[in-house]
Image (cartoon, rainbow, N blue to C red):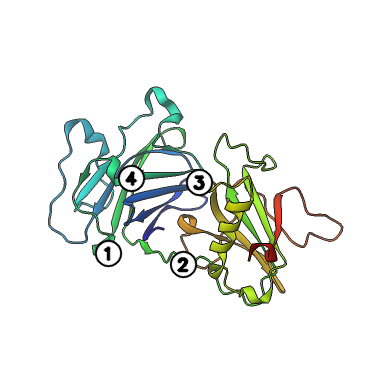
Amino acid sequence: MSDWTWDFGAAGTGVHFTISYDSSAGTFTVHSMEGSFDLNALWWDDGSVDGSVPSLPKGDSALNMNGSGAADWDGYMKLSNAGLGSAGENKTTFISSGETAVFSLADFGIFGDFDPASGGTLGVRATSVNGGGSFKLVDTDPDPDDPGDDFPLWPQDISNVVLYFHQDEGDTTPDGGDGYYLVKIDDVPSLAGDDLDDWIDDVLAYLIANDPNIDGDETLVGVAIKGGTQDTAFFAYGDYNTNGTDADVIPSGAPEFVYPPPQGQVPGPSIDASYDYDFIL
């Protein structure tokens, strides 16, 4: 799980993405909610003003952060050269809207020490943004993550939850053609408790062991919770969660599950599998 998360851009601007850092694994997870881009380099500042800006090799001059609003950089990590080249959008550092990519510190040359707790400013250099152009974005205030706190304490007994698994390109898992495999957990008893954080791991372990369409590679992006008189609400999960226990917007392109359905309608084909809670525990 991630320790820190930075948020770049904003919803509705054409570019909005997060970068989460897992210190134990030494990885950055980049998730684009809106917009596509080629991620070329990450820069960081440890919070102390010492004037020690890394010197870029001549061939990497295009990766500079000049004019970004931050000048006292302490290190950078080059991911790729600017320009898509012959690989085009298949380039490993090209990230499309709705996609997630993980980059390991061990895979790339590291210049300087990176410790978000000591400062945490992160800069992003990217090109080929939404078909052209580039950006230099900076977030000076990362959010420390609590990996055990993705869901709120529900004000009434939870009656059911719907898990949203994102399907990788080429995955043969049935998904109704929408790219998401939705699993509904029905008849949740009061003894389960009203905080999904307490039993989500049990649900995931059961599904991996018993659902032939979930082998552990699928990515759980969030869960819709329903219970009592409260409206169904969606909450992002894990590295997709950038705002703690607050409700989130259902990912772009994912079906919006509403239960019970409006009067006179029946639930659509968005639910791909259903299980009763008592089968899980």
Which residue position is annotated with label 2?
A: 148
**Which residue type carries mark 2?**
Gly
Front disc: 3 or 1: 1
**From this viewpoint, is residue 66 visible?**
no
Front disc: 2 or 1: 2
For this rendering, which residue is in front, 42 or 130? Answer: 42
Q: Quadrant of the N terminus?
A: bottom left
Left or right placement of residue 201 versus residue 161 in this view? left
Residue 34: % across, % down: 50, 46
Give the alpha-carbon distance from disc 4 to disc 3, as whole Å.
23 Å
**Which residue type carries mark 3?**
Glu
Label 1 residue SS: helix
Give the alpha-carbon distance from disc 3 to disc 2, as whole Å.
26 Å
Which residue position is annotated with label 4?
A: 104
Neighbours of disc 1 within 10 Å: few (<14), some (14-19), many (20+) = few
Label 4 residue SS: strand
Which residue position is annotated with label 3?
A: 34
Identified at 26% across, 35% down, the residue is 62
